[in-house]
Amino acid sequence: MKRWVAMIKDTLKVFILFITCTVVFYYGLQLMHDEYEQFHRYDEPTGKAVKVSSWEEPSLVERLTIFLRLGE
């Protein structure tokens, strides 16, 4: 009988630990979501931002060599 009581007691400990960890994890995710929800990724950059690339239309010869080199 003591063995069953000890087993039920250990099972309850594990269950309570699991529920506690799940609740802490859930509220941690909620805090992270609230923090990053206010972060606007597509705003114009501020400060000394530098444009790092520009698009130039490649010539017909360049497009043909890329086409032949990639084998498409």
Image (tube, rainbow, N blue to C red):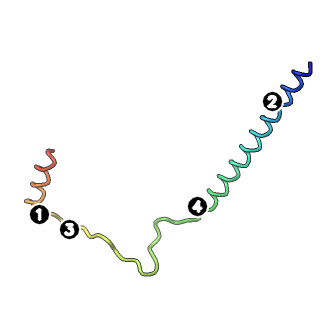
| Residue with the mark numbered 2 | 11
Quadrant location of the C terminus in the rendered image:
top left
- Tell me what residue is drawn at x 68 percent, y 53 percent: 28
- Would residue 56 be found to the left or right of residue 53 on screen? left
Q: Position of residue 33 (x, y in %)?
A: 62, 56
Please rate how many residues cluster around mark 3, counting C-alpha atoms within 10 Å: few if below 14, some from 14 to 19, many from 20: few
- Specify whether 56 is left or right of 35: left
Q: Which three-letter amino acid code belongs to the residue tagged 2?
A: Thr
Q: Which residue is at 7% across, 59% downward? A: 61
Most extreme residue toward the left is: 61
Residue 55 sits in quarter:
bottom left
Q: What residue is shown with label 1?
A: 59
Q: Contact (CB < 8 A) between labels 1 and 4?
A: no
- Find numbered disc 4 in the image and state the secondary structure of the residue it sits on: helix
Of marks 2 and 4, the one in the foreground: 2
Badge 2 marks a residue whose secondary structure is helix
Instruction: Give the side of residue 10 with respect to residue 34, left or right.
Output: right
Of labels 4 and 3, earlier in sequence is: 4
Q: Position of residue 15 (x, y in %)?
A: 78, 34
Q: Which residue: 64% across, 59% down?
A: 34
Q: Is 21 displayed left or right of 39 in the figure?
A: right
Mark 3 or mark 2, which is nearer the start of the sequence? 2
Please report contact status of discs 2 and 3: CB closer than 8 Å, yes or no: no
* Residue that carries the numbered disc 4 in the rendered image: 36
Q: Which residue is mark 3?
A: 56
Mark 1 nearby-residue class (10 Å; few <14, some 14–19, many ≥20): few
In this view, 48 is above or below 27 = below
Give amino acid for label 1: Ser
Q: Residue furthest bottom?
A: 48
Q: CA distance from mark 3 to mark 1?
A: 9 Å
Of tags 2 and 3, which is closer to the observer? Answer: 2
